[in-house]
Amino acid sequence: MVKNFFGKIKDKHIFIFYLLLFFGIAAIIALHQPHMDTPPLYGNPPDEPNRYLVSRFICRYGRLPNGYDPEIRIPVYGISYGFYTMLPYMVQGFVMRFVNLFTDSELLLLYTARFVNVCTGTAMAAVVYGIGGRLFSDRRFKWLFSLLVTFLPQCLFIHTYVNTDSMALFSAALIVYAWVRAYQEGFTVKTSLILAVGIIICSLSYYNAYGYILSSIILFIAFYLKKENGRLCYDWRMFLMRGALISGVVLLGIGWYFIRNAILYQGDLLGLDSLRTSAALYGNAELIPYNHSYAARGLSLQTMLQEHQFFKGIFFSFVAAFGSMTVWGGRSLYLFYALLFLLGWMAFFVVPGEGGMTELNLRQKLILHINMIFCILIPILLCTYYAYSMDYQYQGRYVMPGVIPFMYFITAGLKKLAGLKWLPDKWEKTKKVLSIIANVAVYAAMAAIIILLFRMVFSHALPVYLQSEGVL
């Protein structure tokens, strides 16, 4: 009954509602959360004021700042976000510059910067829907995947304030979409350009998402290895043609930025060594996190993991931690996602049946799956390394670049579980009953995702925001 009712609603209508719902909830958060520190509740998003300095600089002067520029420097630490990749700040800054032609309101300029990310998140939601449609032929699981990614509270929250994470997630979505499209239709010119654009945005957004760039290279190389007449061969012609196209577009898109870094920072392409130099020159040595990290104190990684239950913190803040890791959801929210993640992940690797991308052969699936796991693990490893060697933080947003492949495995596992191929054929009557239960459970999970998101935003986050001083 549920399936028949749902089936009567056209996908395009659900898609429009899905995007409007995302945009509406993200806009509410963007308009209400405070900007500056608001003790004792600290409902402000993580480090937004210091990030906003870069966007505001670009708005004011129409050019990119040098990382050493005192106007964007964080006084206590002696560093700035001008050393990191700046594409998101560039987009925000130049859109703010346009708005600034009509108003000098600092509040409206801040909202402009935030709404660039709200729109980026909405675009990501559309791409995620496209990925879901290609991964899962079953309409139910296409939508379950889309909701799991887009309406994960922390994923939505990422798109509501000034940061580089939002655009990095959008780039990850574009890259995964290009992967799946390529393995279904081949590396056409259009697919190659989508991949190139995704890599450009990723390269200029957030280092934690760079695993997608490496995976794209591996997937592209592996794609042209064919088996013909029982022998392995390589399509060098198409490899060189498409490789030249993708590489050329990517180099045009990012080359200028890293050449600029090399000139400004004496060959330091990524700017990270210069960031440490700036900290040493202008920061307070007693307060710089690097000087008090576990590594600096000679403590082991195991000590860090055991003392603070690091991975437990990663899980909770991956699901939902608004404000400056100060606004948390109810117990039911974390319990729901813990059970869903555990069930889906175990089912994917244990339960027989069809998950996603059923039209691909075993070799193609294996290549895609290995690279998806790689893109989940890289942000986790980087987050663990940064926490140990630089600044202890277990913020789930640091591992958020892996959300799309992670939710793919969860959804594919749940699809296997609901397919009931793990039951013996002789249990025909039992299968019919369980099929109805499984169908209802899928729709119930989708409803729970939306309800729990509403509770997180309206019952837990907004009351904190409304008690704060204001946005500026």
Image (cartoon, rainbow, N blue to C red):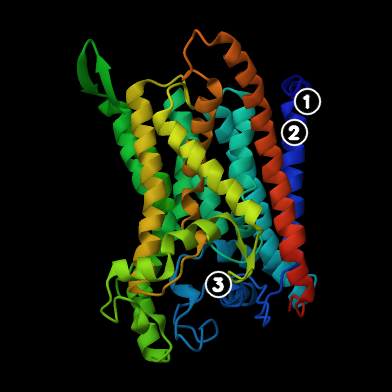
User: For the residue marked with disc 1, what is the amino acid?
Assistant: Ile
- Residue 283 occupies which quadrant of the picture? bottom left
Reading the image, the residue beneath label 1 is 9
Q: Earlier in the sequence, mark 2 or mark 3?
A: 2
In the image, taking residue 109 as reference, residue 204 lies left or right, namely left
Q: Position of residue 279 (x, y in %)?
A: 39, 84
Residue at image point 54% right, 48% down:
338
Give the quadrant of the C terminus.
bottom right
User: For the residue marked with disc 2, what is the amino acid?
Assistant: Ile
Q: Nearer the viewer, mark 2 or mark 3?
A: 2
Q: Position of residue 139 (x, y in %)?
A: 63, 25
- Residue 145 occupies which quadrant of the picture? top right
Q: Does 414 appear above or below 295? A: above
Q: Is residue 304 visible?
A: yes
Q: Earlier in the sequence, mark 3 or mark 1?
A: 1
Residue at image point 56% right, 73% down:
51
Q: Residues within 10 Å of mark 2 (few under 14, many from 20)?
A: few
* Dots 1, 2 in contact, CB < 8 A: yes
Q: Position of residue 290 (x, y in %)?
A: 36, 80
Task: Give the distance between the C-alpha atoms of the residues marked 1 and 2, in whole angstroms.
Answer: 7 Å
Label 1 sits on a secondary structure element that is loop
Give the quadrant of the N terminus.
top right
Q: Earlier in the sequence, mark 1 or mark 2?
A: 1
Reading the image, the residue beneath label 2 is 14
Residue at image point 34% right, 47% down:
214
Reading the image, the residue beneath label 3 is 63
Q: Does 41 appear above or below 229? A: below
Label 3 sits on a secondary structure element that is loop
Q: Is residue 242 visible?
A: no
Q: Does 214 appear above or below 299? A: above
* Dots 2, 3 in contact, CB < 8 A: no
